[in-house]
Image (cartoon, rainbow, N blue to C red):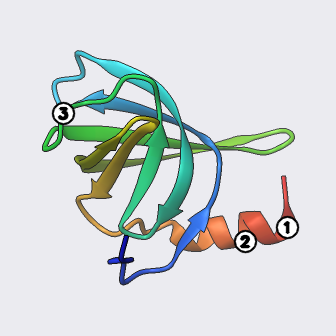
Amino acid sequence: MVEQRERLRIAYKTKVMLCTESKEIFLAASTRDISITGMFARTEVTFPIGTQCYVEIILAGKNTEMVMRINGKVVRREAEGCAIEFENDLEWWPVFKMYLQYGK
């Protein structure tokens, strides 16, 4: 498979919540990797391709939690989850690099 990404992605595992725009269906998941423009969410159940969704990315430290919220769309499904393309670039992207560098 040819790599089509133009942006850096990092292997990163953290909790995420996915829900439909109407907030009728919520899915608990975890990330496999993330970039400034999207992420792959590992989950047993996924939304159909093209589904607009609301994403909550949860970074947990020893004593605090930070939640990032962003809108996205399911662009690919696989057996282990789905790829989400963010509606806008993830403005908090530099936090992931710092979080990885300094650890949990």
SS label for mark 3: loop
- Near-viewer residue (43 or 58): 43
Say which quarter of the image contains residue 88. Answer: bottom left
SS label for mark 2: helix
Where residue 26 sits in the image (x, y, percent)? 35, 20
- Identify the mark nearer the N-term, 3 or 2: 3
Where residue 73 sits in the image (x, y, percent)? 22, 48
- Identify the mark nearer the N-term, 1 or 3: 3
Residue 98's disc is 2
Q: Is residue 80 above or below residue 38?
A: above
Where residue 62 sits in the image (x, y, percent)? 86, 41
How far, Cα to Cα, is label 1 from label 2?
Answer: 6 Å
Where residue 34 sits in the image (x, y, percent)? 50, 60
SS label for mark 1: helix
Q: Quadrant of the N terminus?
A: bottom left
How far, Cα to Cα, is label 3 from label 2?
Answer: 33 Å
Q: Residues within 10 Å of mark 3 (few under 14, many from 20)?
A: few
Q: Residue at x 42, y 37 (%)?
A: 81
Residue lying at the far top in this picture: please name it: 24
**Which amino acid type is shown beneath numbered disc 2?**
Met
How far, Cα to Cα, is label 1 from label 3?
Answer: 36 Å
Q: Residue at x 18, y 33 (%)?
A: 48
Q: Are marks 1 and 2 in contact (CB under 8 Å)?
A: yes
Residue 73's disc is none
Q: Which residue is mark 3?
A: 48
**Which amino acid type is shown beneath numbered disc 1?**
Tyr
Q: Residues within 10 Å of mark 2 (few under 14, many from 20)?
A: few
Comparing labels 1 and 3, the label whose residue is closer to the camera: 3
Q: Are marks 1 and 3 in contact (CB under 8 Å)?
A: no
Q: Is residue 101 above or below residue 62?
A: below
